[in-house]
Every structure is written in C-alpha cells, then in structure tokens.
Amino acid sequence: MNLSYWEIKSWLTNIDFCIVGSGIVGLNCALRLKEQFPKSKILILEKGTLPQGASTKNAGFACFGSLSEIIDDLNTHSEEDVIQLISKRVNGLKLLRQTLGDKQLNYQQLGGYELFLDADEALFQSCISKKETINKLLKPHFKDNIFSLKDNIFNFKNVNKQYIFNQFEGQIDTGKMMESLLEKAHSKGIKILNNMQVEGFSEDTDSVKIKTNQFEFSASKLLIATNGFASKLINQKVKPARAQVLITKPIENLHIKGTFHLDRGYYYFRNIDNRILIGGGRNLDFKGEETTEFNQTAIIQNKLEALLKTTILPETPFEIDYRWSGIMGIGNQKKAIVKQLSNRVFCGVRLGGMGVAIGSLVGKELADLTA
C-alpha cells in the first residue's frame, strides 16, 4: 500500500496496544487500557465499515438468562458455575450502564417474559416446579425474587395462558450503545481503522508483527476481540453461530412492551420504535448456522414470519422492513475465553450470545491481563 511518511508516523508507529475488533469487547478493552495507561497509543482494527460480528447486529436484550435457560444450564454446569455466569452477566450490564449512562443506551427496564408454546406444557410445568428453588438460589444477588407468573396480558396465541416474568430484565438501543462507545473511544484519542482484515501475526522478543490485507506493522501487544471470528486467527475452541433477525415496519397502537423469550430461548422478540423485532431459529439448522457468512435463509426467515402471524401479531397486519444476521461466538461451555496466549498476545472471545450482558466486563478483564 502507498503509505506516506505522515500516515506511518501518526497511525502505525510506536503502537502500545493493537486491538482486533471494534465491537463491545474491543472498545471497552481500549477504554480500560486508556484508563490504566493514559499516555499509551492504542490502535483498533475493524474488518467492517461498521463493527462486524454481533455488536451492531444484536436484538438489544439487557438480559441474564430465562428460567428455562438457567434450569438447562444447571443440568450441564455446576451450581457454582451457573451462579458465576449470572453474576458476570448482571455485573457486565451494570458496567455497561455505568460506562455510558442509561440515556445514551435508551435503557428501559420493562421486564422480560418467557412464553411457552401449547405443545411445551411439560416444559412449562417443569419450570414452575423449579421457580422457587431458582429464586431462592439467586435471591442473595438480587435481594428479591426474580421470577413470577403473569397472565397472557398481550393476547399472544398458541401459548400457555401464563408467562414467567423476570422483573429485572431490560432492553437497550444497540445502535445508540455502539455510537456512544465509538464516540467515547475517539474522545480518548483511541484510533480506529475500518475495513482492515487481519490475516495473521508473528511475535518476536519485543513486538508483534501484524499482517493486514493492506499493510504490515508492529505493536508492543496484540489483543484479539473478534468473538465468532476468533478461530480464523487463534487456536481456541470458538464456533461461529449466526443469528438471523427481522423487524417490522411501525405498527399503530402497538401494545406489546418488553423482551420476550419463546421455545426455550431459541426465539426472542421485543418492541422497538413501535415495531416488533424478532430473531432466532438456529435450532432449525444448527450446522448450517455454524457460519461466518452474513446472510439469511428461507427456512429461518419463514419461521420468524410465521411466529409473527400465528403467535405474536395474529390479529394485526404488519409488513417486514429489514432483515439481517449477526455472528456470535459459542462453545461447549458458556464461560468466555479471556486469557493470555503468549508473551504479547491476549484474547477475549466466545461470549456465548451474551455480548450485551458481558461484553463490557470481558473487555475490562482482557485489558487487565496486560497490566
């Protein structure tokens, strides 16, 4: 690439920390590093025009796990691990709100609802039978019961006449969150280069040489925050998982307010700007959705539309306005991978679909590894 002396001097020389990925983790990592090392030179590389992956693509749920998800986690993780997972999500959301402020996030605590299809009566009864046990388990962390029962006040069809309600669940405006994080990073003198694909890196005694699709340069330390794309750069157990989403055009007199989980959390929807946003359906094609390709498939998009017609908005005409997808990073365990990989290389990846909840905390932990 035809770089000038000025470009090399200002952007690519004496870099203390190079971060790959300008999503929630990468930006929070950079902000924490700037706090710890005010005079450091920090450069973030982002492969997209906007932050790729899931940070600008998610549904904006400020959640920490539905009742059925927590019960399911207790079957595959220890009780201590599950409490730690939930605690990290709650603390991560607190950190996000402290970092940006509720107004900048458009944070609203409207509560979360778990819906059960008529065919899932056995699952509903199982959750009800364990509700008080889970409330008791988590009460020390919330000082109140989390889960309670509510009637079908939104008149959804083909679901149980009662929901499980989570009073602590909220929602945010994902676009405002990322705008605010980017503005905060720029205001601190953190440099971000977009449309930069990192192709590889090599480490020597005093620096890391980073090869991009446009040029090579060196940094003192390299921090990888690419979540679902991590396995392209580092040898860690992170699988990409695509999440498909669609949103309606504005609907007059929309009475649905809150965040909603359906069919064991495989589907989720919410209100936003008098619209309904709905996503999920990975369970229809797990293998096919294990991809880093940003597109949609008929099988999942048709299912999302069918749920709108038959369950969520059965008596309300609607039109689809936008469709998109995001790439998450998942693994056999739900714990994020935050570790030092070598003397000068670190990673914070595998957020397990909980990027809004834990991204700020993972970014902070990643930065703290370098201290």
Image (cartoon, rainbow, N blue to C red):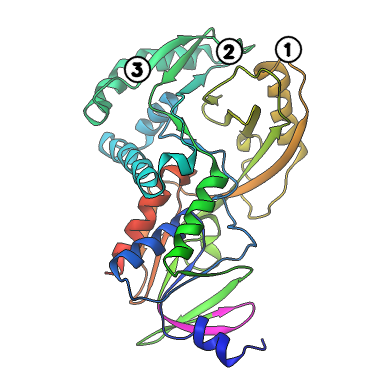
Q: CA distance from mark 2 to mark 3?
A: 25 Å
Q: Dot 2: within a 10 Å radius of its alpha carbon, few (fewer than 14), some, or many (20 or more) residues?
A: few
Q: Going 38% across and 41% down the picture, which residue do you hit?
A: 93
Q: Which residue is mark 1?
A: 315
Type of the residue with mark 1: Glu
Local SS, label 2: loop
User: Which is nearer the eye, 4 or 157?
Assistant: 4
Mark 2 or mark 3: which is in front?
Answer: 2
Q: Dot 3: within a 10 Å radius of its alpha carbon, few (fewer than 14), some, or many (20 or more) residues?
A: few
Q: Going 34% across and 17% down the picture, which residue do you hit?
A: 130
Type of the residue with mark 2: Phe
Whether 351 is drawn above or below 40: the answer is above
Mark closer to the chain start, 3 or 1: 3
Q: Which mark is residue 130?
A: 3
Check whether the beta carbons of the residues at disc 3 and disc 1 lie within 8 A of each other. no
For this orientation, the residue located farthest to the bottom is: 5
Region in magenta: 211-220
Q: Which mark is residue 154?
A: 2
Q: Is residue 42 magenta?
A: no
Q: Position of residue 348 (x, y in %)?
A: 41, 59
Left or right of 108 on screen, residue 268: right
Whether 5 is drawn above or below 29: the answer is below
Whether 285 is drawn above or below 11: the answer is above
Left or right of 124 on screen, residue 129: left
Q: Position of residue 168 (x, y in %)?
A: 38, 27
Q: Going 34% across and 61% down the picture, which residue do you hit?
A: 32
Magenta span: predominant SS is strand
For this orientation, the residue located farthest to the left is: 140
Q: Is residue 219 magenta?
A: yes
* Whether residue 236 can be seen here: no
Type of the residue with mark 3: Lys
